[in-house]
Image (spheres, rainbow, N blue to C red):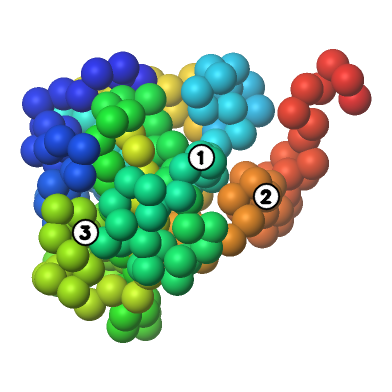
Amino acid sequence: MTDSPGSRHDRWMAGSTGDIAPAWGEEPDGDGRSLAGDLLVAAPALVDPNFDRTVLLVLDHGPEGALGVILNRPTEVEVAEIIGSWASEARRTPPALVFSGGPVAPNAMIGIGRLAAGPARGAARGGEGPAAGGWRAALGADTVDLSLPPGSQDVAIDGARLFAGYAGWGPGQLEGELEAGGWIVLGAIPADIFCEDPGSLWSDVLRRQGGELSMLANYPPDPTLN
């Protein structure tokens, strides 16, 4: 996992307000499908403290690398303290706190808005979705330009979540971590992005899978104490 943004990711990180493009190409991975719109759930074997028991939403994935944000690490900083114009939208998706999106560029912000129209019925997940919507239509969410007020966005939104920093991977790096068993790739649902109880998201996502994966939901944070 990279600890500094690459040239591709720089397109979306511009200063402290994060001039994030509302759409980007969903290029396929080596297996022919982009993971954009999917969840990366940290496996119990992942020992990196930056990502212990984290759930990430993949925003971009292609030959040049991948980018995502951590969904379950709220800070103690209220959105109103950082970008007042977005405080009311953050309160629509409590907790109205800035989330730690990852270790890369922690002073930059990424915003994800909940689309007022909601998820598109029948939309496919991940990069397999229709060209007109893809994962954004499926999840009823899209990135927003935080340098503009909510009412000036290209899409109508009903709530937003703001992330400080992001997680980034260079070419082939995420694929290597997947092969090593560090991440579990799972489908996302709209409630994952704007969950009200981020502390339980890791367990909740695993539990709803059923089978062996659901058993991991009860895996103790420190198995040596079990």
Point out which mark residue 114 bears: none
| 138 relative to 109, above or below | below
| 62 relative to 89, above or below | above
Residue that numbered label 3 is attached to: 144
Residue that numbered label 2 is attached to: 200
Q: Earlier in the sequence, mark 3 or mark 1?
A: 1
Q: Are marks 3 and 1 in contact (CB under 8 Å)?
A: no
Circle 1: element type: strand
Residue 215, position in %: x, y? 77, 44
Point out which mark residue 75 bears: 1
| 2 relative to 98, above or below | above
Circle 3: element type: strand
Circle 2: element type: helix
Q: Nearer the viewer, mark 3 or mark 1?
A: 1
Residue 205 visible (yes or no): yes
Q: Earlier in the sequence, mark 2 or mark 3?
A: 3
The span from disc 2 to disc 3 (Cα, nearest Å) is 26 Å
Residue 194, position in %: x, y? 48, 61
Q: Residue at (37%, 68%) from the top-left corner? A: 88
Instruction: In this rendered view, identify the residue nearer to me: 107 or 45.
Output: 107
Characterize the local packing of mark 1: few (<14), some (14-19) or many (20 or more) Cα atoms within 10 angstroms: some
Characterize the local packing of mark 3: few (<14), some (14-19) or many (20 or more) Cα atoms within 10 angstroms: many
Q: Residue at (32%, 29%) from the top-left corner? A: 106
Q: Are marks 2 and 1 in contact (CB under 8 Å)?
A: no
The span from disc 3 to disc 1 (Cα, nearest Å) is 20 Å
